[in-house]
Amino acid sequence: MKEEQRFTIKQTAEQTGITEDTIRYYEKIALLPRAERKDNGHRIYRQEDIDTIRLIACLKKTGMPLEEIRPFLEVSVDTDPAEYPELVELLRSHRENIVSQITSLQQVVDFIDMKLDEGKYRRDCSDEENVWVEPKSKPVSPGEMRYFSVSAKTGKSQASAK
Amino acid sequence: MKEEQRFTIKQTAEQTGITEDTIRYYEKIALLPRAERKDNGHRIYRQEDIDTIRLIACLKKTGMPLEEIRPFLEVSVDTDPAEYPELVELLRSHRENIVSQITSLQQVVDFIDMKLDEGKYRRDCSDEENVWVEPKSKPVSPGEMRYFSVSAKTGKSQASAK
DNA sequence: CTATAACTTGAAGTCGACTCCAAGTCAAGA
DNA sequence: TCTTGACTTGGAGTCGACTTCAAGTTATAG
């Protein structure tokens, strides 16, 4: 009934944006489970594996080191996290981290906005007992930061001003 | 009229959360300008320097590599960025990066929330042609992500479940 | 039959960002 | 005077995360 699609490592790399080498590396350090092999020894991946790799990529983007990603992969497979209270704690705690990271990022955006539309003073950027400059303009153009939908622009800009 | 306060490297480290070694390292790679010295050769820092170091810390938190931070420090001192159009471009472009990073983080928060309040399915996390699971709960408890004020909790949680 | 492409493996190399070390200077206290 | 502490320097070492390499296998195309 189900004819699940299989992918080569190359296709997988293309779909996830993670290089073949890196995928093999993740397998080597057991971040990914040992992939199934064809008779000739070549790795094969299914959609599920691709999702996992994407999740890794996503967590990595948030600056999470590989070792911290590990437990997330366990919880993310099929488990009901309620059965693993320590994992729930982990999730909560990382959620806090991320929310605070978002705040941090938001401050940088504000800093940039401030610079962009006046370029005068400058304030600090600590997170304890935070004294931030008064937001005289928009905190972040509210349309741009709609939580969902990345607005199909390729997103990949790499600072490059000579 | 102004009696500007000076700080030792130790005090500076304490105030910024960056270690002395790292501060010296930043000076070594010229991310920070060579600090003034006392007669005995000891470094001295003023508030301005501390602000700069805090800015570095803040940008680092956003995952920006040191080399990319460099141009930000130039613009951040006293310059009106309008005079440096390439810097304006850099700022805009990094702003885009960050906004997209925030979206990415937001997705992780959503993933976690989803896991936390059901732990059933699992969706991917790519940013091109993004198919995200329907947000059945709050996108991120809206109070928590108030752009300003990190709500004086120490913010420093480090995943640690045995 | 041979060459090319797509993979495999284990091991070594690279790079960014620290982090540590050894040796030295200087000032103040017991 | 000796010791302690806070610093200085240059250089070496570490660590995470790749990235590259060399050598080998297998499948298909010319």
Image (cartoon, coloured by chain):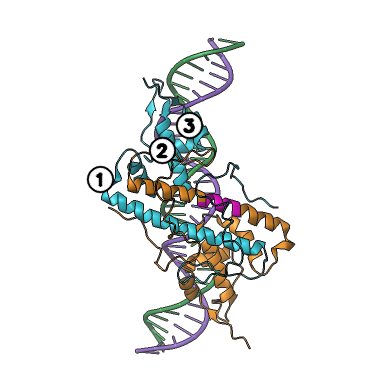
Chain colours: A orange, B cyan, C green, D purple
The residue beneath circle 2 is: B52
Query: Which residue is located at x 55 percent, y 82 percent?
Result: A5
Q: Earlier in the sequence, mark 2 or mark 1?
A: 2
B141 vs B150: above or below = below
User: B106 and A83: which one is in front?
Assistant: B106
Residue named by callout 3: B12
Q: What residue range appears in magenta?
A: A95-102
Q: Quadrant of the N terminus of chain B?
A: top left
Q: Chain under label 3?
A: B
Asked if labels 3 and 2 touch by Cβ distance under 8 angstroms, the answer is no
Front residue (pair A102, B122)? A102
Image location of residue A118, percent across then percent down: 32, 44
Chain assignment, label 1: B
Do badges 2 and 3 share one subunit? yes
Q: Nearer the viewer, mark 1 or mark 3?
A: 1
Q: Is residue A21 above or below residue A90?
A: below
Name the residue type under label 3: Thr
In this rendering, do the residues under marks 1 and 3 share a single chain?
yes
| Magenta segment, prevailing SS (helix, strand or loop) | helix
Q: Residue at x 38, y 20 (%)?
A: B39
Q: Earlier in the sequence, mark 1 or mark 3?
A: 3
Q: Is residue A75 magenta?
A: no
